[in-house]
Image: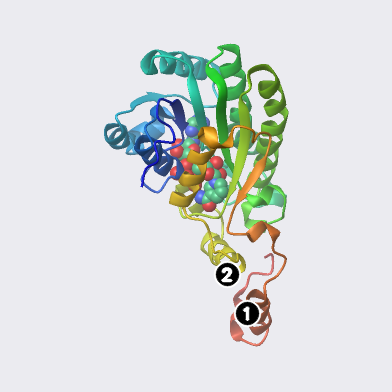
Amino acid sequence: MAYNLLKGKRGIIFGALNSNSIAWKVALKAHEEGAKFVLTNTPIALRMGELDELGKACNAEVIPADATNVEDLEKLLTKSMEVLGGKVDFILHSIGMSPNVRKGLSYDNLNYNFFEKTLDISAVSFHKILQVARKLDAINEWGSVVALSYVAAQRTLYGYNDMADAKSLLESIARSFGYIYGRDKKVRVNTISQSPTITTAGSGIRGFDKIVDFAERTSPLGNADADECADFCITMFSDLTKKVTMQNLFHDGGFSSMGMSYRAMSQYNKSFDCEAADEVPTEW
Ligand SMILES: NC(=O)c1ccc[n+]([C@@H]2O[C@H](COP(=O)([O-])OP(=O)(O)OC[C@H]3O[C@@H](n4cnc5c(N)ncnc54)[C@H](O)[C@@H]3O)[C@@H](O)[C@H]2O)c1
């Protein structure tokens, strides 16, 4: 059901790759809620993904940009304002990638060139988008910028690797830039810390299906799925959340406030009695 929450609003959505992507669901809901927006991703993602299909479904132009490249971002924001007929009201940063995770390198054996790429793609790109947007004065007053994060920014979840550091930086950028952009232009900047969700980026994490299952059983409300995450993003882009800024907002069914649930503890204890315990790799 649509509420016209984004009627008359313009935006830019980064990170839709395929129909599993969280950004894909956000685009469909933003369209339903009356927004006009531009879709963007890297040139290689545009070749490999299905973004044109989404563009057609949402009547949205697709503009390539590598979010780590400031020149690309300047062109993207300038072109977006032309195409949409004015400054934007919302931006979604739904971008994450770790070459160390992709190559299966563990946290105590990182390749530092890869580590820099992880940070640049998954966190510094957020700063670059905000800095370029502010210099071009591309966001209307009371606009809303959201990036997607994960609880590994605060708590150790072993398989998340150097992405945990990237998410900590991402959340810090939301606070630091949120102050400047709020003070100057009333633009709000937040991160949404989402439950583990089966997508291309998520599935790259070692033992991801087990993380999803553990979170599902531990969270009192169960995991939030990608559609529910999209609903939350839409609310954050709407005028209903005008005074929310510089926050990391957990959207995880309560997982982040849990220590140990009775169910999880019973299951954990059982694992010591059965042979399956021998199958758990020692480094976990
Ligand atoms: N899936 C999960 O479990 C989960 C949980 C919490 C947060 N998140 C976050 O949600 C966001 C979206 O991920 P997703 O799960 O939808 O996976 P996804 O793989 O569908 O999206 C990741 C996107 O990042 C894009 N990207 C990579 N490098 C880029 C670059 N240099 N410039 C521009 N775009 C680039 C990819 O092309 C892709 O579209 C990420 O920030 C991810 O960390 C995901």
Q: Residues within 10 Å of mark 1 (few under 14, many from 20)?
A: few
At label 1, the amino acid type is Gln
Image point (42%, 18%), residue name: 80
Image point (45%, 24%), residue name: 65
* CB atoms of marks 2 and 1 within 8 Å: yes
Between disc 2 and disc 1, whose residue precedes?
2
Say which of 116 and 81 sits in front: 81
Q: Nearer the viewer, mark 2 or mark 1?
A: 2
At label 2, the amino acid type is Arg
Residue carrying label 2:
217
The answer as to whether callout 2 falls within 8 Å of ligand 1 is: no
Would you identify the image quadrant in which residue 170 lies? top right
**Residue 157 shown left or right of residue 234 in the figure:** right
Task: Residue 257 in the image: state x and y as whole percent.
Answer: 70, 59
Q: Marks 2 and 1, Cα distance to the nearest angstrom?
A: 10 Å
Image point (59%, 28%), residue name: 125
Q: Secondary structure at mark 2?
A: helix
Image point (61%, 86%), residue name: 274
Say which of 5 and 213 sits in front: 5
Residue carrying label 1:
267
Q: Secondary structure at mark 1?
A: helix
Say which of 99 and 4 sits in front: 4
Image height of 106 relative to 62, above or below: below
Residue 182 visible (yes or no): yes
**Residue 9 shown left or right of residue 61 in the figure:** right
Q: Residues within 10 Å of mark 2 (few under 14, many from 20)?
A: some
Image height of 177 relative to 262, above or below: above
